[in-house]
Amino acid sequence: MAEAMCERSVTVPDEVFEEVRRHFDEKAIVELVAMVALENMRARFNRALEIPSDGLCPLPANHPALKAPDLTPTPFP
């Protein structure tokens, strides 16, 4: 279960961090990353347990999140 839920690694490119640093100080960046991580945890939790959306924020019909997930295992480096 843990491997299936965590198989995609997350790497933030240096260019993205450089742009973020132009707008936020270090404390704000830590808070931003914490909030994004929390929402990611909630999304993975709901997805793993197949908890459907509550409909508060409907996605456009062509949104990638509405496509069937790619369940092909990704080998670890």
Image (cartoon, rainbow, N blue to C red):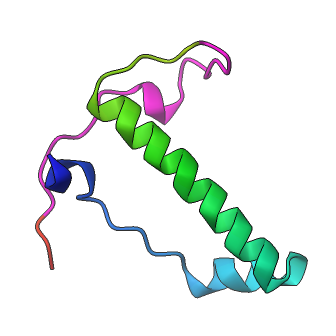
Compared across the picture, whether 63 is left or right of 58 comes to: left
Compared across the picture, whether 74 is left or right of 26 comes to: left
Q: Is residue 62 magenta?
A: yes
Residue 57, position as x, y percentages in the image: 67, 21
Q: Residue at x 49, y 49 (%)?
A: 40
| Residue furthest out toward the right | 23
Q: Is residue 67 above or below residue 40?
A: above
Q: Is residue 50 above or below residue 37?
A: above
Question: Where is the C terminus found, in terms of image quarters?
Answer: bottom left
Q: Nearer the viewer, residue 12 or 1?
A: 1
Q: Residue at x 13, y 47 (%)?
A: 72
Compared across the picture, whether 42 is left or right of 35 comes to: left
Q: Is residue 34 magenta?
A: no
| Residue furthest out toward the top | 55
Q: Is residue 51 above or below residue 2?
A: above
Magenta segment boundaries in residue numbering: 55-74
What secondary structure characterizes most of the magenta part?
loop
